[in-house]
Image (tube, coloured by chain):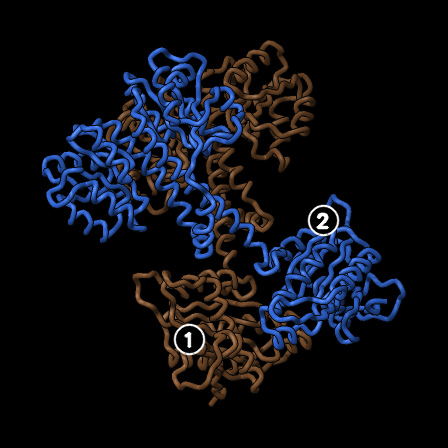
Chain colours: A brown, B blue
Amino acid sequence: MPAQILVVDDMLLSRMILRAKLTAACYETRLASNGAEALRLVAESVPDLILLDCNLPDTTGLEICTRLREDPKTRNVPIILFSADSARSTRLLALEAGADEFFNKPMDDAFLMSRIRSLLRASAFEQDYQARATPGLRHGLAEAVSLFRPDGRVTLVRGRNVFAGSSDDILDAGAARIFHDSCNVTDILAGKFGQRKPDILLLAPEVLQEHGIHLISELRARHATRRIPIAVLLQEDAKSQRAMALDLGAEEVLSLPLDTEETQLRLRAMVKRKHRIDAMRHAIGVELDLASRDSLTGLFNRRYAMSRLSDIVMTPADAPSLTYALLLIDLDNFKQVNDSFGHVAGDEVLVEAAARMRDAIGPKDLLARYGGEEFLVVLPDADMTQAHAMAENIRARIEGRAYRLSNGNYSLNITASIGVTVQQSAQSDAYINRLDQIRLVVDLADHALRVAKSTGRNRVAIGQCADAVADGAPLGTEVNHDCVVRCARGGS
Amino acid sequence: MPAQILVVDDMLLSRMILRAKLTAACYETRLASNGAEALRLVAESVPDLILLDCNLPDTTGLEICTRLREDPKTRNVPIILFSADSARSTRLLALEAGADEFFNKPMDDAFLMSRIRSLLRASAFEQDYQARATPGLRHGLAEAVSLFRPDGRVTLVRGRNVFAGSSDDILDAGAARIFHDSCNVTDILAGKFGQRKPDILLLAPEVLQEHGIHLISELRARHATRRIPIAVLLQEDAKSQRAMALDLGAEEVLSLPLDTEETQLRLRAMVKRKHRIDAMRHAIGVELDLASRDSLTGLFNRRYAMSRLSDIVMTPADAPSLTYALLLIDLDNFKQVNDSFGHVAGDEVLVEAAARMRDAIGPKDLLARYGGEEFLVVLPDADMTQAHAMAENIRARIEGRAYRLSNGNYSLNITASIGVTVQQSAQSDAYINRLDQIRLVVDLADHALRVAKSTGRNRVAIGQCADAVADGAPLGTEVNHDCVVRCARGGS
């Protein structure tokens, strides 16, 4: 249950010291003294984070890091490489191999601990999305990831004054295309960006001096910037702020003078991570929308239609009652289409019929696929004349033109039968169950639909319940079975 | 685009000073000098946060706050009430009226600003979920919220040493049932809770002294605790830490000596907010799962089946090819059920048939509603003998018992026709399009299904494509149309 950290180090003493520090901070540690052991432990169970020495007796930390990055199971596990060798090339190789951070021994404890925290936080955030990955979402994700390209936009955030000590560095960084544009901190806080929303905010050293380190938390709070990862540029002597910057939510801390190549590697990794998270967010949005839609026609599905209907059949006690209409539309003899031309052809007809109905309805009306070849339309504020006109319009559009099938040269004539009912919304303080009310309305329309079918198809029939009938015909008491059905001849 | 803060204060000077401070921090401000004006501005457009004076010429800030909390549009807008009156009763009334925070004038600027940040951050987080609220989700939410009851569990987090100055307070708080259990900080970090996961972590004063203030960020990073809101108890003289605690992610800061009633009000508000967010998260999870399911039968839907199938028709280049089977199952003469008994009856039959199929398949098999009364089964690793046995099993189960309808005393006999095909998965380096491959397989099963229908229904037919046929019958080249179809008599 506690976060598990794998420590890979060939020196016993060094392993023990690291373990003591991590245990004091309540992490669970596992230890490996060489690469083979490390890989074996990872295969047994994937740790939450790996602290990995560059120098190992059987291989190098870089090699292990590269291998872990190639395996889908460990691709996103945070890895911190460390080495006694302080050569610039080692550091660059570590970042290139996919390490999230590189430390020189002896390590700065406070910064190491805040680094571990920040990496675990970012990783837990991603795992949140992964955990949501229902089977459908996993497929959506694979598609969404390919939508995002790896060219990120880094925006340098400037303060009022540029410090003499950093201006050359910034100029060099600009020349090296480390950032793509720059922006004033006040504009950023106001959500005013340049041409394009940045992928990364790179805070110039003067910014935190002018606004205080809590600016990071300010950017995390603002709507416009809260999802943009922050990298902080610090003067060489401001190292004490590094840990706090990470704890406040910055993802990366860079010290001046900037190493161009290293900075580019770090920023590129940030962009990649951001795009991964954007893709997941996008996939979830798509998936959530899909949950209320029919996948074939793109219309709302039955579940959604029923929940919308439950808002319509009943109005708040203090709001006026509304007259609404419900239409049940069924394509005639549709089974024959499937049986004679196959399901692909049947689907084409459904898609085309759905499009014609979509053209017929108004912006406030609800159109849903109710099941199979049956559709449902709700007109939230319509009387019998309007409802009948709409039903007749839909019937005529569906009959209107022949349906061309893409496979073969067939062209089909399709008609629809429609059952209509018009009701008053109930007051929500009335002693009526919402679900009973929905069932009643759908049953009335369904009954009318069956009458339309049995009297010849391609026509509209109206179903009204007993108490809505004006002409005083002798009617029974059970609303459900006592419908007055009038038939309107189709096409007349 | 910048966060908009409404300042309501009857004193001109006080309004101007607040505006200057907020503008300096890059917030957009609007000003109102009385309650009527405030309500008018809110009605025009809802601000991101409201700073509200208790004393207004036409009404009281408390009254305004109460009204805003009653309106669904402003129910969750952060409100900070302030007053020159330092009476305890005023503070309690403010919190009772639904204010998120109460300040005495003159206000502590640093703390005010960090309070604004932390409230905006929490509110943006909630708005994220709201923004996801597709129509379907909004309904799911309404249901989910009702699942969570307002009794939250507050766990006091203790350090090693209890400071003399605070032990009485803690005892009093315990007696007042402000917290429900207590736990050691090391256990909390290790994810070891008492009987139940806490809803709120209340950090005792010694904890931050022993572990440093970055413990807050540590708790935000750990998997077990990252979603549990944190309230911090501070010694009276540790006020300088208040702003930082909020910036690091604490939601509430309480100073000793504790006011029992105030603490309870604040913790109750935290619990309410947490449950609201839990409910949204739950609703999203439900919704995501629904996106891959058919709402009537609860089986996977067609979209999901197709995406799973796309994994099955092709295997990685270095993995062995697998033999898989696809079954298309169609209920016979189903249209008659709908036409004669109505859609409710038709749905009952579909649900019952789905349940019988679900009982037939194995844990690794995929069963989906393919559309209308048609179902699809994929056996990811099955040869012809196994596939035929499964198809026959399903056919027999569907025919097995009569289907009783809940409405009326009818009992229906239902049968199904089944088309089966067995294929080898393609290697992913083969020059074959995945979608073409899916289409081919489904077409083969569909063709077999139509043969089963046309030769008398309630039977299983096998569709094999040309190159899979052993007996060397003269066959054309177009796989799509050259199926060897063998019919197995149903029930034999």
Q: Distance between the residues labelled 2 and 1?
A: 48 Å
Of A409 and A303, nearer the camera is A303
Number of marks in picture: 2
SS at mark 1? strand
Task: Give the quadrant of residue B280.
Answer: top left
Q: Point out residue B185 in the picture as x, y percentages from the top left corner.
A: 47, 20
Of B71 and A94, nearer the camera is B71
Counting other residues with Cα less than 10 Å from the Cα at mark 1, is it few (<14), some (14-19), or many (20 or more)? many
Task: Give the quadrant of residue A457.
Answer: bottom right
Residue bearing the label numbered 1? A422
Of B318 and A304, nearer the camera is A304
> Quadrant where the C terminus of chain B lies?
bottom right
Of B307 and B173, nearer the camera is B173
Q: In this view, does A208 lie above or below A287?
A: above
Asked if residue A190 lies left or right of residue B431, the reply is left
Q: Specify the amino acid type for callout 1.
A: Val
Q: Is residue B112 above or below residue B78?
A: above
Q: Point out residue B334 in the picture as x, y percentages from the top left corner.
A: 67, 72
Residue at horizontal 25 percent and vertical 27 percent from the top: B110
Residue bearing the label numbered 2? B364
SS at mark 2? loop
Asked if residue A409 lies left or right of residue A354, the reply is right
Residue A232 visible somewhere in the drawing: no
Q: Residue furthest right?
A: B471
Q: In this view, does B308 lie above or below B202?
A: below
